[in-house]
Amino acid sequence: QVQFVESGGGLVQAGGSLRLSCAGSGSTFSIYAMGWYRQAPEKKRELVAYISSGGSINYADSVKGRFTISRDNAENTVYLQMNSLKPEDTAVYYCNAPHSSGWFAPWGQGTQVTVSS
């Protein structure tokens, strides 16, 4: 079963930047579409960025122009570059591979991003 491990979170001031990494297991990483998700306290998990196996990209309106998703299939890794961070970006960030009725992997522990004002 494929698994993903997130890293790179931390505490940053508003306006700052962070780069999150998502490392996947297995040799079939390149076939998966990948998403970065986040969940703030008492809120539902939401998709913030998506990259298909072919490289097509979509972003949530709230992060467009500030976040950039990319992937390195040779390294089995997906990245999320986050710039101009805002306090409302504070959340636990997760990665996973979505499919039509769910996700291919169990949810990992995520990585905490905290943006201070």
Image (cartoon, helix red, strand yellow):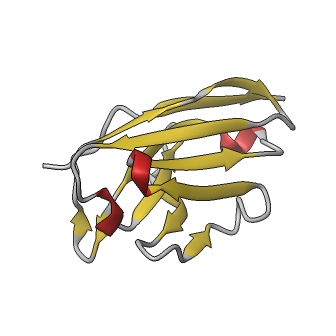
| On screen, residue 87 above or below 79 | above
Q: Is residue 68 left or right of residue 76?
A: right
Residue 62 coordinates in the image, percent (x, y): 71, 61
Residue 72 coordinates in the image, percent (x, y): 49, 53
| On screen, residue 113 above or below 54 | above
Residue 82 coordinates in the image, percent (x, y): 71, 45
Instruction: Identify which residue, 16 or 92, lies in the foreground.
Output: 16
Residue at (67, 47) in percent of width and height: 81
Residue at (26, 77) in percent of width and height: 100
Residue 78 coordinates in the image, percent (x, y): 48, 50
Q: Residue furthest front?
A: 74
Instruction: Identify which residue, 87 or 58, lies in the foreground.
Output: 58
Task: Tell me which corner region of the image, top left, top right, bottom left or bottom right, holds residue 10.
Answer: top right
Task: Tell me which corner region of the image, top left, top right, bottom left or bottom right, holds residue 13.
Answer: top right
Q: Is residue 21 left or right of residue 34?
A: right
User: Which quadrant holds the C terminus?
Assistant: top right
Residue at (51, 39) in percent of width and height: 21
Q: Residue furthest top?
A: 11
Q: Is residue 16 left or right of residue 113?
A: right
Q: Residue furthest left?
A: 1
Residue at (70, 55) in percent of width and height: 67
